Image: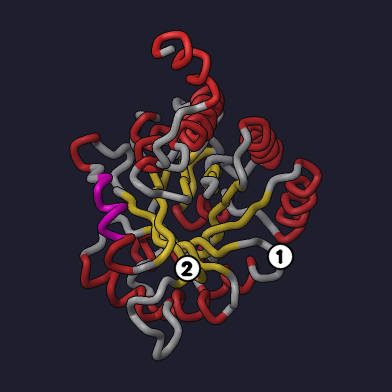
Amino acid sequence: MKTYIIAEIGINHNGDMSLAKKLIDIAAAAGCNAVKFQKRNPDVCVPEHQKNVMRETPWGKMTYLEYKYKVEFSKEQYNEIDRYCKEKGIEWSASPWDLDSLDFILQYDSPFIKIPSAHLTNLELLKAAKESGRKVILSTGMSTSEEIDDAVKILREHGEELGKFNKNFALLHCNSTYPAPLEELNLKCIQTLKRDYKCEVGYSGHEFRLGTTVAAVYLGATIVERHITLDRTMWGTDHMASVEPQGLIKLVRGIRELEIALGDGVVSVTPGEEQVRKKLRG
């Protein structure tokens, strides 16, 4: 099965459509299957006690609520994202952080709905995403087994046999530290999730390294998500844990090379070995 690679633009566009398009270009050129954004209704998502907190931004000093609106794209801008991605031959979606944003995303023919780790315990949002009929991809960062159990119960069909493989949702193993330390990645959880929940499992990485994400595919991840940026030193909370253009190209190439190298597991004499075998064994 070919790995589905998602380039997470998130809010690394900093509210700039030209920057968003450059990141789409990079993801398409690298061979990613999709790009992903984040969608919020700031009035709903920002806690009341944070709305009027002042924050320094590239646009000057403003309230946190004003800042969150500054990095949100409008309907017209998402229409342009939809058009541009189709032109570039790459799929797209966005992570809804509230019910309003889920309804917004469902206006488009995005192939999946991605629920971030922050909302794994938002059972109302999970239920609405499932009822949309789209494939739901759920990150499991900073979550307990019990919390994942509760989320999966929502995503499974009512009365569905627990041991049956469900293709309508996927879980992504994830560590929610930005950037995530190597000793806390616990990549073997990919196998644990596959065993326990009988669904497609992937990996959402926030570490500096690339090899660990390739290793996730070796361990069974069939979906990979990494944040991308033009430059890790850019202003914004997610840039430091993101992959720059050359790194993204290397990552996609590494995953595709691994897929080729893994083979089918059948012991046999390969075509390339035939002449060597004849020469050395007669």
Give amino acid for label 2. Phe
Q: Nearer the viewer, residue 147 or 59?
A: 147
Q: Which residue is mark 2?
A: 169
Give the x, y percent position of residue 256.
53, 34
Horizontal side of residue 110 vs 180, given as left or right: right
Give amino acid for label 1. Tyr
Horizontal side of residue 47 vs 92, given as left or right: left
Q: Is residue 191 magenta?
A: yes
Give the x, y percent position of residue 249.
55, 27
Q: Identify the residue shown where x is 63% and y is 35%.
A: 31
The secondary structure type at the circle numbered 1 is: loop
The answer to whether any part of residue 244 appears in the image is: no
Give the x, y percent position of residue 162.
33, 80
Q: Which residue is mark 1?
A: 108
Helix, strand or loop: magenta stretch: helix
Q: Identify the residue shown where x is 59% and y is 54%.
A: 72
Query: In the drawing, what numbered circle is on residue 30?
Result: none
Give the x, y percent position of residue 227.
48, 40
Q: Residues within 10 Å of mark 1 (few under 14, many from 20)?
A: few
Horizontal side of residue 203 vs 89, given as left or right: left
Look at the picture and state if 64 lies above or below 149: above
Q: Quadrant of residue 184?
A: top left
Q: Quadrant of residue 170?
A: bottom left
Q: Where are the magenta residues, as a range?
A: 187-193
Look at the image and tell me in which quarter the C terminus lies.
top left
Look at the picture and state if 219 lies above or below 40: above
Q: Nearer the viewer, residue 56 or 271?
A: 271
Q: Nearer the viewer, residue 103 or 236?
A: 103
